[in-house]
Amino acid sequence: MTFPRALAAAVLIGTALITTQPAQAAVPDLQLVSRTVGPASTASQSTIADCPLGNSILGAGGEVVGGRGQVGLSMYTQIEREWGSAQGDEDADGTANSWSLTAYAICTSGPMRQSLSQFSTYDSPAEKAVTVRCPAGTVTTSAGSSVTDGGNLILDDAVPSADLTSVTVDVFESQTGRTDNWHSVASARCGVPLPGIQRVAATSATDSATNKSVTATCPAGKKVVGTGHEIANGKGQVLLDDVVPSADLTSVRAEAFEDQDGTANNWSITAYAVCATA
């Protein structure tokens, strides 16, 4: 399923605690579901992970296996139809490697939240950022991000704000660029604050290693309800590989690779875990 159809069907630790709490004591029946496609060697792959019937989605993630700097995760987002959607795209010259893609959805039997999205301008600059904000009195449980189909776009950031009231997505054109117009989309899953909700961040070392992985872990007694990531100083030459909630929903791992000709830039990657009492 391509992005337009999916949407239409629609180490440093920091925390920010949302102090307003609803009456419920914990997020009910949290579970992680996933779906994998591939391995294959195609220009693009996409898939969705469906929450069980009657459940609602809180957050999403995605994972590329076998891309190693020649395939980038270009979408992981949660949408109204209660599924997590992910897409990966090969770089401009493709790869003979077979690679697979997994979409993740974090689901609950609790009340459904509102999916809000903000589109960027539709043009062709080298970089484009867009922010979506939750209505007053509500917060997001996750960052969602997506870009126009066609490849050669690098999903640099999908950041839930420290107070969880907004999501900012930043996208770069790759080195080869694009001649057509494109857009990026920031998505949030907004609703009343969940019990004990907070953002936890973990940041890798800042250097020019070929790839980096970092994990943000929830405090004891809390579970992951959403995800996000941020690549600093990649400038379109560092491809996002994974934003993965752990199977037990205690942490989020983010990983990125330099593109195939590398970069002299010193860069880092941050994993964001949105955590709540469960």
Image (spheres, rainbow, N blue to C red):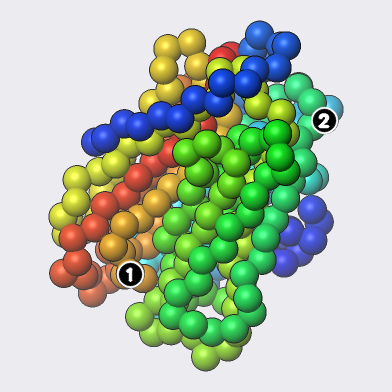
Question: In the rendered image, which quarter is residue 207 located in?
Answer: bottom left
Give residue 206's position: percent from left, percent from top. Answer: 19, 51
User: Could you tell me if residue 269 is visible in this image?
Assistant: yes
Q: Residue 37 or 68: which is nearer the viewer?
A: 68
Mark closer to the observer (1, 2)? 1
Compare residues 19 and 10 and report the one nearer the observer.
19
Considering the numbered disc 1 on the image, is that residue within a helix, a strand or a loop?
A: loop
Q: Nearer the viewer, residue 92 or 37?
A: 92
Q: What residue is pinned by disc 1?
A: 235
For badge 2, the amino acid type reads Leu
Which residue is found at the position 66% from the left and 8% from the top?
25
The spot of residue 217 in percent (x, y) is 39, 26
Placement of 237 over or under 38, stated as above or below: below
Q: Say what secondary structure mark 2 lies in.
A: loop
Q: Could you tell me the amino acid type at mark 1?
A: Lys
Residue 234 is situated, as x and y percent measured from the top left of the image, at: 30, 64
Q: Residue at x 50, y 71 (%)?
A: 128
Note whether residue 75 is visible: no
Q: Quadrant of residue 201?
A: top left
Between residue 16 and residue 10, name the one nearer to us.
16
